[in-house]
Amino acid sequence: MAFLDNSGDIILDAVLTDTGRFRLARGDGSFKITKFAFGDEEIDYSLYNKNHISGSAYFDLQILQTPILEAFTNNTSTMKSKLMTISRTNLLYLPVLKINDKLTKTGMFDTAGANFNDVFLVAVDGNTLDDTNIRNANGNSLKSGILNGTSNVSSYGVGGYIRIDQGLDSNEISPSLSIDQDLYETQYMLEIDDRLGRICTKPTESGNNQPGSTISFSFLDDDMIASYYVTDSQPDFVKNNQSTGHIDQGAGSTDNTDQSQVIRGPRGSMLEFSIRASTELQTSSYLFDRFGSTDSANLMGLGNTIKYIDTNVRVTGVTTGYRLDLPIRFVKKPS
């Protein structure tokens, strides 16, 4: 790994993805470049100086001469900020993705000591779900932010799920307006460590309160990161957000309000899903002992024997390239 020499000509340094290298190595004709992407995570646009004493040719000189690392193929450590091309020049806002934690079942885990706020906990087995520390004070439901990571029905409810909302997060445009179709996310890519968990539909709360159903990943790379593609043709995952209410109602306003929303302007699609713990996590403590820790100080308030592993689930909007990294903590109470 080294820095590119960008003191003179502009250099284009391109590498193949893991899939591309795999198909090239097979030598069976399956290798064909069909897509490419650019990223700009190493660029500091605040270096643009429109007041440079030498004139407009030097406004972006510092940006062009920023030291840039050579391209490398590890998808987990590069291309975190992909660029996109939109031919229109009249856009004032671009859509974002935001975690919707406003609903009863989509909140994130919280503790009185605020040690582990802003994380989703996945209880990996029935023994963990049965622990009184996992449940609310009434004893008959799981605490907010705790997902049932098993395939079994828990007598304490189905647990929570994760919801991601997409849209224009600005008060300058009314949420009653529709988002432009070329900014509407119709498909999402979800990435998770396959050793730890699988992506599944959100649990159902009608009938017998069934946990969600797992789906097959689209691709598994050499780092054991599984990629799942879901589209609006799968309504269990992707739906149109039809809410037009304002998050906050201003003084004297007669506008409708909807405080279950997190996007302030026009809304696009919403993604709902849950996580199933892997068989290894459900049946063994090996990965917890190898990659995780024990909350011996009881900082989570779940007991001082709870084992946990921290990881992320990465959610990317395929249309706009906007990405969120969701903090996930798998927890297990030893038998």
Image: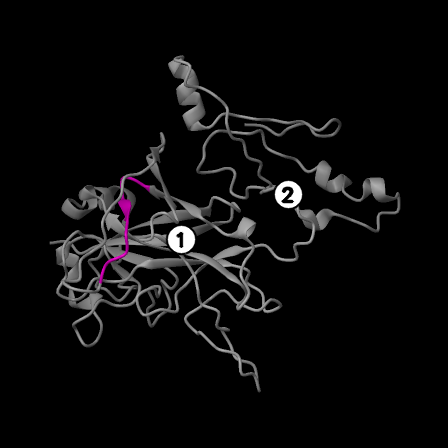
In-image side of 94 versus 312 (left or right): right
Residue 191: image x %, image y %? Answer: 37, 43
Q: Name which residue type carries label 2.
A: Ile
Where in the figure is residue 281, as x and y percent of width and height? 20, 46
Identify whether 56 is placed above or below 248.
above
Question: In the image, what residue occupies the spot 82% across and 41% down?
Answer: 58
Q: How is the image coloured?
A: one colour
Which residue is at the far left? 335
Q: CA distance from mark 2 to mark 1?
A: 24 Å
Helix, strand or loop status at disc 1: strand
- Near mark 1 (Cα within 10 A), the count class, few <14, some 14-19 or many ≥20, is some
Tell me the quadrant of the picture where the C terminus can be found: bottom left
Q: Amino acid at mark 1?
A: Leu
Residue at 17 percent across and 56 percent down: it is: 333
* Nearer to me, 153 or 34: 34
Which residue position holds label 2?
43
The mark nearer the N terminus, 2 or 1, is: 2
- Image position, residue 209 (x, y; %): 17, 62
| Span of residues in magenta | 193-204
- Residue 75 position by quadrant: top left
**207 displayed left or right of 217:** left
Which residue has dot 1 on it? 326
Would you say residue 182 sits in the magenta stretch? no
Q: Is residue 76 left or right of residue 63?
A: left
Residue at point 34% right, 58% down?
Answer: 162
221 or 167, which lies in front?
167
Write down the quadrant of residue 250 in the picture.
bottom right
Q: Residue furthest top?
A: 27
